[in-house]
Each structure stands twice: as C-alpha cells, then as structure tokens.
C-alpha cells in the first residue's frame, strides 16, 4: 500500500486538477459539430472495439454543469479540457457559432466554480475536410490550425489559465500515421515523417499566433515513456535508444533545442518535407510550461526481420492496468528528473495526465476501485520525489474525470474517478473520487 498524500505534502500553490478531452466526452452529434477523422475511423470495421464512436459519449455537451459540479466538489483547483476543431470549424474553414458559444459557456462555468481553466487546442478531432487533404501529412493542415487557434482564443482566451497547443504529438503522428492504431489508421513511413514534422509546425505556428494576440502561459503536452531494453544484448539496447528517440527525443530536442535527434533524422530524412529545417526556429520558440502525460514504461527488443525502426514490444512482468499497461511509478519520477535536467531547467512542468483504467462495476450504487487509489498515491509519491530532486513541478492532473470513449478501445476501458452508465448517462463517483476529495480537502 503506497502512503497517502495530502495537499500539505506538496509545495504551496501546487495545482491539483483533473483532465478530459472533447471527443471523448462531449458527444459529437450535438451542437452542429462537423465530422472528424475519428468518426470515419470508428465506422471502419476492426478499428475500434465494437465499432463504438464519440457521437454521444458522456453527453457532456448537455451535462457540463453537472460534471463541473463534481470537479468542484472533489476539491480540485483546475480543470483541463480541449476544444474540438470539428465543432469550432465543421468544414475546416467556417466558424460554427454554436460551437464557440458552447466553449464560451463552458469556460464561464469553470470560472464560476473557482476552477482554473486549462485549455488544450487539439486533442485529435481533426475535421474530415482536412483529413481529405491528407491530414497531418499535409503542411496546409498546420497552417489551418492557426485559424482554429485564433477562433478559440478570441472567444475564450481572456479567461484561460494555461493553453496547450497540441496533446501528444507522438500519438497524432507516429501512432496514427506509422503504427495505424489511431485515426486515420495509416501505416506509411513517409506520411508519418511528414506528420511528425507538421504537428510540431502546427504547435509553433499556434504559439506564434497566440503571442500576437497577447495570450500568455503557453505550452504543449507530450506523452513520454521510459524506454527499457528487453535484455542487455547490444542489439536490444540500441532498440531501446530508437524507441526513446522516436517517442521522446524527437519532440524534446525539436522544441527545446531546435533540432531533430540525428540518429532518428538519419532514417527519416528521405521522407521529410522539403526545407523542414527552415521551420525549426518557429518550432523551438520559447514556451512557458511543459505538460507531461505519463502512464507506463515501454520495453522493446530488436526485431531484425523488420525494416527500421525494427522494434518489437515486449510485455513486462509487473502488475498491469485494464489496458495491459505495467504500473511503474518510478518511470514518472525518472522522466521528470531527466526532462528538467536535460531540457527544461527551471521552466514549470505539469503532469497533465496520469491515471489508470480498471474494469469497474457498480454494486449497490458504489464503485470500489482500490487499485486505482494505489495507482494515484504511488504516482503522487513519484511526483513528490521528483520535486525533492529539484524538479520545478507545479501541478498534477488525474486522467480522467469521467469514464469515456477510450479511442480504439471504445467504452470498455474505464479511466474515470466518476463512473458513467452509458445507457442512462448516470454519474456515480467512485471510491477513488472520495479518496481524492479527502486528500484535497485535508
Ligand atoms: C492519451 C490521451 C487520452 C487517453 C489517455 C488514456 O494519452 O492517449 O491524452 O485521450 O484517453 O491517455 O489512454
């Protein structure tokens, strides 16, 4: 059993929050939202568990007041949410007034509860019209992202605490265009190399646009993994470096040093867009904070039978979550220390996502989720240990407030501290919610 943490164990002013994302909770059939690439990806056989989609999700579009009451009742300081590009610009071009009005009301409702609004501009709902032109493989998509940025910031920017441009560029690019697990489900190294660059270009352009509008507290959210080799064999150790390069260094080096890591660039160079070097100063424009999403570590072996990067995922032997992800809190501490020593120095860091899926069930109106409670406290301990080593960590957000549409896993995997019955939309706070409330209110 990990030790329990309370507010007083963290520095004064440390921010505790919970996080969600638009497509996973809002219900994309509401409010004249346009089609996005997740709608078509889900409608294609074998992509998403039971071919589920985000059409209704948690119907947060209509129930956001009730959901925000829960965030407030739990004692959180902040609420991280995203704006759907397809809701704001259904055809990728024209503004949907109803979409912006929704976010206007949402931000007012967050502020009315004395919660800090932490906005993410892109959490994966790419309008289908932009998927049609090649999505993130096309430079034009990065340019269009400025229109979305401007529309959202002009509407709610005056009340926002922090803005993240992109959530998890590795997922947007590599997982979606190379591994094919997320929309648009491509498995193509040339499209992937382009997406790996254009998503960072979109970040840089968006930061630039927001600075011109006078918006402050700008950042980006990276999902980092601690890479481990399957054995001590040099071939596996090299494989570990490739995983680290693609997953972590590609983004950290680009954003904080203005270059791509040479070992990975050597392999991707021939597929990269022309003159990509000219974008690097924009991509590495200073930011005000960095968000890190952390769930588990990655173990890889060399797979010499396959072309570069010749990686084979290996299952670890530690306890796992419902996702099959190893529970490895130490990785969070190690990453925070590494990032702050090698890249960010005294720049504020936030853990913008951390959480666990469990096969939760309601019994007599109660959801008992002790393994999630252990997961939370052991990761809070890791965060605390990083602070003790001098990391300027300023906040921690639990993923997620609600059980929701877990992308390719549909509604089966439950990450929420609030249970959602997807038939009735009834919300039931779980034992972990009560535990958070105890920690935050003591
Ligand atoms: C991500 C996203 C979330 C996921 C969560 C659990 O990290 O993939 O930001 O949308 O739901 O991470 O997989």
Image: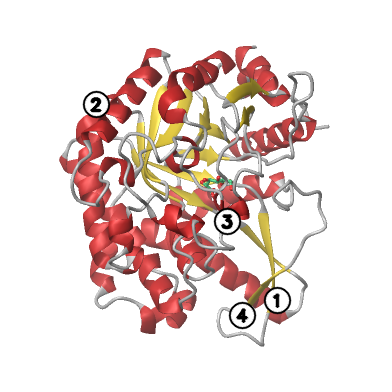
Report crowding for label 2: few under 14, some 14 to 19, many 20 or more residues within 10 A (C-alpha). Answer: few
The correct choice, above or below, for 441 with respect to 337 in the image is above
Residue 265 is drawn in which quadrant?
Answer: bottom left
Q: Which residue is mark 2?
A: 158
Tag 3 secondary structure: loop
The disc placed on residue 236 is 1
Report crowding for label 3: few under 14, some 14 to 19, many 20 or more residues within 10 A (C-alpha). Answer: many
User: Extreme left residue here?
Assistant: 212
CA distance separating discs 4 and 1:
10 Å
Report crowding for label 1: few under 14, some 14 to 19, many 20 or more residues within 10 A (C-alpha). Answer: many
Residue 300 percent coordinates (x, y): 69, 69
Of the image marks 4 and 3, the number of the one nearer the N terminus: 3
> Split into 4 quadrants, where in the image is the N terminus?
top right
Q: Is residue 252 visible?
A: no
Of the image marks 3 and 2, the number of the one nearer the N terminus: 3
User: Extreme bottom residue here?
Assistant: 305
> Split into 4 quadrants, where in the image is the C terminus?
top right
The correct choice, above or below, for 342 with respect to 61 in the image is below
Q: Which residue is mark 3?
A: 48
């Amino acid at each position: 059993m990990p030790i329990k943490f309370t507010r007083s164990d963290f520095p004064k002013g440390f921010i505790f929050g919970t996080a969600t994302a638009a497509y996973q909770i809002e219900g994309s059939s509401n409010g004249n939202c346009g089609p996005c690439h997740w709608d078509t990806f889900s409608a294609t056989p074998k992509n998403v568990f039971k071919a589920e989609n985000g059409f209704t999700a948690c119907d947060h579009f209509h129930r956001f007041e009730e959901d925000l009451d829960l965030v407030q009742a739990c004692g959180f300081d902040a609420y991280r949410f995203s704006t759907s590009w397809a809701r704001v610009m259904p055809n990728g071009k024209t503004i949907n007034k109803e979409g912006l009005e929704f976010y206007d009301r949402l931000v007012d409702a967050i502020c009315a509860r004395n919660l800090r609004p932490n906005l993410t501009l892109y959490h994966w709902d790419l309008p289908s019209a932009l998927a049609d032109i090649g999505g993130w493989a096309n430079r034009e998509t990065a340019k269009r992202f400025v229109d979305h940025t401007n529309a959202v910031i002009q509407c709610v920017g005056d009340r926002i605490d922090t803005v993240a441009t992109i959530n998890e560029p590795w997922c947007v690019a590599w997982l979606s265009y190379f591994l094919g697990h997320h929309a648009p489900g491509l498995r193509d190294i040339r499209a992937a190399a382009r997406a790996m660059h254009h998503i960072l270009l979109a970040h840089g352009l968006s930061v630039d646009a927001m600075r011109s509008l006078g918006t402050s507290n700008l950042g980006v959210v990276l999902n980092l993994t601690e890479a481990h080799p399957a054995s001590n064999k040099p071939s596996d150790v090299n494989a570990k470096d490739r995983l680290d390069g693609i997953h972590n260094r590609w983004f950290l080096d680009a954003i904080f040093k203005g270059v791509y890591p040479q070992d990975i660039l050597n392999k991707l160079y021939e597929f990269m867009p022309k003159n990509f070097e000219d974008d690097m100063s924009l991509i590495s424009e200073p930011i005000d904070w960095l968000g890190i999403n952390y769930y588990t570590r990655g173990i890889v072996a060399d797979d010499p039978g396959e072309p570069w990067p010749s990686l084979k995922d290996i299952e670890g032997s530690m306890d796992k979550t419902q996702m099959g992800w190893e529970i490895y809190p130490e990785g969070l501490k190690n990453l925070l220390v590494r990032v702050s020593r090698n890249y960010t120095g005294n720049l504020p860091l936030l853990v913008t996502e951390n959480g666990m899926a469990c096969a939760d069930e309601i019994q007599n109106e109660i959801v008992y989720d002790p393994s999630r409670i252990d997961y939370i406290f052991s990761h809070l301990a890791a965060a605390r240990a990083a602070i003790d080593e001098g990391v300027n960590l300023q906040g921690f957000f639990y993923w997620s407030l609600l059980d929701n549409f877990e992308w390719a896993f549909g509604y089966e995997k439950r990450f929420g501290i609030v249970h959602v019955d997807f038939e009735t939309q009834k919300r039931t706070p779980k034992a972990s919610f009560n535990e958070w409330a105890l920690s935050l209110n003591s």
